[in-house]
Image: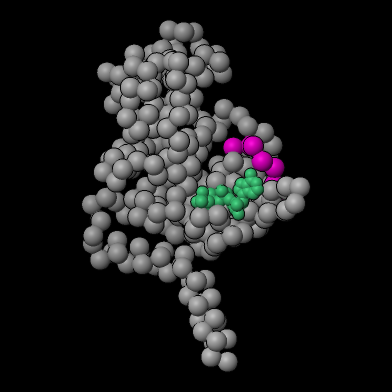
């Protein structure tokens, strides 16, 4: 849970990069007031792969939107490197689930170059070198002159990841980036993301409602309750890798997370049964 005060390590007290402190998020429409998250708190540290895991509608995307600066909390606050988040900025880059997040009239290279030329103080030559180095990291060098409509879904997501990382954000925000891919491509993309992380060591907040994906991609998981989203638990899964899939230990952690996620339903069902039987 968020403390913002840091953790003690052999290297000294390490401060969190991002602090989400008691954050309540609401949507106000003409007819309704929807509470998406309720007093959510957590800390994210440099180079973590932090996963927000929870059932549909528990407010994962809303939290990410708010970290990105698109939505202000009605209670609590968020701080990135000590600064209160109150607007979007290039220090937080987002990758979405949709394949149409690229500019269709620009090539792969053009898509990665575009935000660099607009936001970074780089010459075109410097920006091109930098963009190419990122495209190489996501294995797309051969496709730099291709337009998005000629790419597969997985390739489009790799361009979106390269474009976001090229901006060297303090934190990369990924909202179910692989959910629309077929199962094989999804697994490949999960592996590639972790490989890329091994190479670049960026900080990422990754939203998913797949337990398996959370265990494979994350180093730490925040398990959220159903609507309105609250924190249920934080689970350290740093030592689980793809090689552990199918092992008793992997299954054990999977079961633990599953039970945490579905505990409410079990309690609800027990209560309904109790009421039905008087
Ligand atoms: N623009 C909006 N206006 C009103 N209510 C909204 C809006 N967007 C989301 N909500 C509501 O806020 C709650 C949280 O939604 P959110 O999309 O953040 O959940 P989620 O956990 O990301 O779900 P999913 O896994 O299905 O994407 C839901 O009850 C949803 O109906």
Q: Residue 142 magenta-drawn?
A: no
Residue extent of the magenta highlight: 68-74
Seen in the image, is 164 located left or right of residue 92? left
Q: Main secondary structure of the magenta part?
A: loop
Above or below, 275 against 100 in this view is below
Residue 78, quarter of the rendered image: top right
State the residue lying farthest toward the bottom: 278
Q: x and y percent of residue 209 in the render?
A: 44, 53
Please provide percent x and percent y for residue 196. Answer: 34, 35
Q: Quadrant of the C terminus?
A: bottom right
Q: Residue at x 29, y 61 (%)?
A: 250
* Any part of residue 22 in sight: no
Q: Is residue 71 magenta?
A: yes
Report the side of 57 relative to 200 (left or right).
right
Coloring scheme of the render?
A: one colour
Tell me: residue 125, above or below residue 136.
Answer: above
Q: As rendered, which of 148 and 175 lies closer to the eye?
A: 148
Which residue is nearer to you in this view: 177 or 167?
177
């Amino acid at each position: 849970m968020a403390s913002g005060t840091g953790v003690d390590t052999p290297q000294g007290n390490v401060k969190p990069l991002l602090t989400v402190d008691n954050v309540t998020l609401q949507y106000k429409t003409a007819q309704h007031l929807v509470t998406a998250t309720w007093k959510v708190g957590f800390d994210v540290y440099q180079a973590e792969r932090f996963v927000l895991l929870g059932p549909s509608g528990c407010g994962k995307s809303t939290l990410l939107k708010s970290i990105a600066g698109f939505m202000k909390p009605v209670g609590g606050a968020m701080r990135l490197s000590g600064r209160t988040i109150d607007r979007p900025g290039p220090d937080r880059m987002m990758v979405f689930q949709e394949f149409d997040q690229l500019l269709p009239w620009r090539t792969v290279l053009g898509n990665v170059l575009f935000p660099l030329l607009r936001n970074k103080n780089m010459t075109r030559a410097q920006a091109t070198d930098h963009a190419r180095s990122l495209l190489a990291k996501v294995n797309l060098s051969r496709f730099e002159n291709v337009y998005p409509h000629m790419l597969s879904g997985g390739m489009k997501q790799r361009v979106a990841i390269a474009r976001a990382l090229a901006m060297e954000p303090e934190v990369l925000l990924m909202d179910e980036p692989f959910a629309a891919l077929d199962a094989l491509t999804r697994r490949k993309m999960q592996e590639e993301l972790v490989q890329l992380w091994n190479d670049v060591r960026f900080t990422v907040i990754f939203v998913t409602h797949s337990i398996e994906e959370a265990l494979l991609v994350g180093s730490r998981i925040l398990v959220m309750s159903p609507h309105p989203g609250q924190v249920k638990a934080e689970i350290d899964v740093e030592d689980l890798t793809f090689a552990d899939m199918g092992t008793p230990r992997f299954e054990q952690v999977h079961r633990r997370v599953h039970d945490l996620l579905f505990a409410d339903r079990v309690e609800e069902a027990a209560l309904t049964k109790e009421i039905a039987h008087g």
